[in-house]
Each structure stands twice: as structure tokens, then as C-alpha cells.
């Protein structure tokens, strides 16, 4: 089975997710304010985190998809979040960036640092022309991350997603290969 390579930044190590990360994923996955703007529901038990690892992460690894990388601090190996890119369209050479971070580490530039390395990795290792990223319009923190990454705002898709009993407007950002080389 393919697994994401280990990528080091100034402060972080990005690596594959392991079953032993289940408690760390549950630690943030159970918090409703973290999943408020995501398309996944808060984890109700560690088993939900195990399902995420086995059914999502491992399944993606089997398909060679670089999503998710575990985000860890260099000084320890504890997972504090996830980041990665999944395919939107192989035909159109487009991937989508996704990320989540334990709120104990918000406001420290960790997601920007991790996501920048994943963007670079994907452009270097996959035949892609574009990486897009989207967020619910109300998610101002995620919008700021995309801006700090140098992604360009493309527009708002009104009522694009029906989730949790209501329609959500989605903001789209992207970066093209020509913009990073």
C-alpha cells in the first residue's frame, strides 16, 4: 500500500496517518466548533475516528491519493491535524486541498506551513494543473488560510451544498501550476 512520504518543515513533520492516531483524531474530531464548517459530523466515539482512518485515509492511500497527511510537531509524533489533496478530476488535472487542525494550535500558522508543503508536493509529484480549495462562506478562518497560501479567489457558489438541514454558500479559491513555478 502506498503511503504519504514524510515531509519536514521548520516546525512540523507531515507523515501517513496510523491507527495509533485514533485518540488524537478523536480529541479534535469530537469538538462541534471544529467540524462546524466541515462536511463531516463530530466524532461521537473513538470508533468514528477509527472509521475515518480505515475507511477514508487507508482507502485513499490504497489509491495513491495524498490525503490525509498527519500533521505533527517536530518535538513529538502526536497528530494535531490533517492536510492533503484529493482528486476533483484526473481528466481535468485538478485536485482539492483539505485541512483540519486541533483548536489548541489555531492561530500559529501551522495549517499554512503544512498546506504549503502539500501543495508543493502535489505539483511536483502529480500531473495536475490546478489545486482548488473551498469553504463555507461563513468560515472566515479557512478563507484567511487560503489567502495566506496565495490562492486566488474565484467566486461564490450560492446554495451549493445542502448540509445539516440548510443550504450553504461556498467560496472557491485556487492556485495554478504556472503561479508557483
Image (spheres, grey):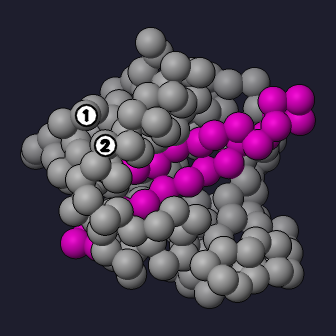
The residue to which callout 2 is attached is 50
Q: Is residue 11 visible?
A: no
Which residue is at 28% across, 49% downward? 47
Kindly give the residue lying farthest to the right in the view shown: 92
Observer-nearest of 86 and 154: 86
Q: Is residue 52 visible?
A: yes
Observer-nearest of 37 and 8: 37
Q: In the picture, which quadrant includes the N terminus?
A: top left
Kindly give the residue lying farthest to the top in the view shown: 1
Q: CA distance from mark 1 to mark 2?
A: 7 Å
The percent coordinates of residue 104 (x first, y second) are: 22, 72
Residue 175 to residue 93: above or below: below
In what element is the residue under mark 2?
Answer: helix
The residue to which callout 1 is attached is 19
Q: In the picture, which quadrant includes the C terminus?
A: top right
The percent coordinates of residue 19 (x first, y second) are: 25, 34
> What is the number of callouts on the image?
2
The percent coordinates of residue 78 (x first, y second) are: 16, 47
Q: Which class describes the residues within 10 Å of circle 1: few (<14), some (14-19), or many (20+)?
A: some
The percent coordinates of residue 88 (x first, y second) are: 76, 43
Q: Is residue 70 left or right of residue 99?
A: left
Amino acid at each position: 500500500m502506498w503511503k504519504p512520504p514524510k515531509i519536514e518543515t521548520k516546525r512540523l513533520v507531515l507523515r501517513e496517518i496510523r491507527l495509533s492516531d485514533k485518540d488524537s483524531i478523536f480529541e479534535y474530531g469530537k469538538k462541534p466548533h471544529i467540524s462546524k464548517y466541515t462536511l463531516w459530523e463530530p466524532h461521537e466515539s473513538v470508533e468514528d475516528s477509527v472509521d475515518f482512518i480505515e475507511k477514508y485515509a487507508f482507502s485513499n492511500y490504497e489509491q495513491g491519493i495524498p490525503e490525509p497527511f498527519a500533521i505533527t510537531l517536530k518535538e513529538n509524533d502526536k497528530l494535531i491535524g490533517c492536510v492533503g489533496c484529493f482528486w476533483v478530476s484526473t481528466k481535468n488535472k485538478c485536485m482539492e486541498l483539505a485541512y483540519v487542525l486541533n483548536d489548541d494550535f489555531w492561530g500559529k500558522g501551522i495549517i499554512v506551513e503544512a498546506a504549503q508543503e502539500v501543495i508543493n508536493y502535489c505539483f511536483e509529484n502529480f500531473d495536475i494543473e490546478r489545486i482548488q480549495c473551498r469553504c463555507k462562506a461563513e468560515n472566515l478562518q479557512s478563507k484567511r488560510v487560503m489567502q495566506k497560501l496565495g490562492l486566488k479567489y474565484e467566486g461564490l457558489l450560492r446554495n451549493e451544498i445542502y448540509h445539516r438541514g440548510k443550504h450553504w454558500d461556498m467560496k472557491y479559491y485556487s492556485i495554478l501550476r504556472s503561479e508557483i513555478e
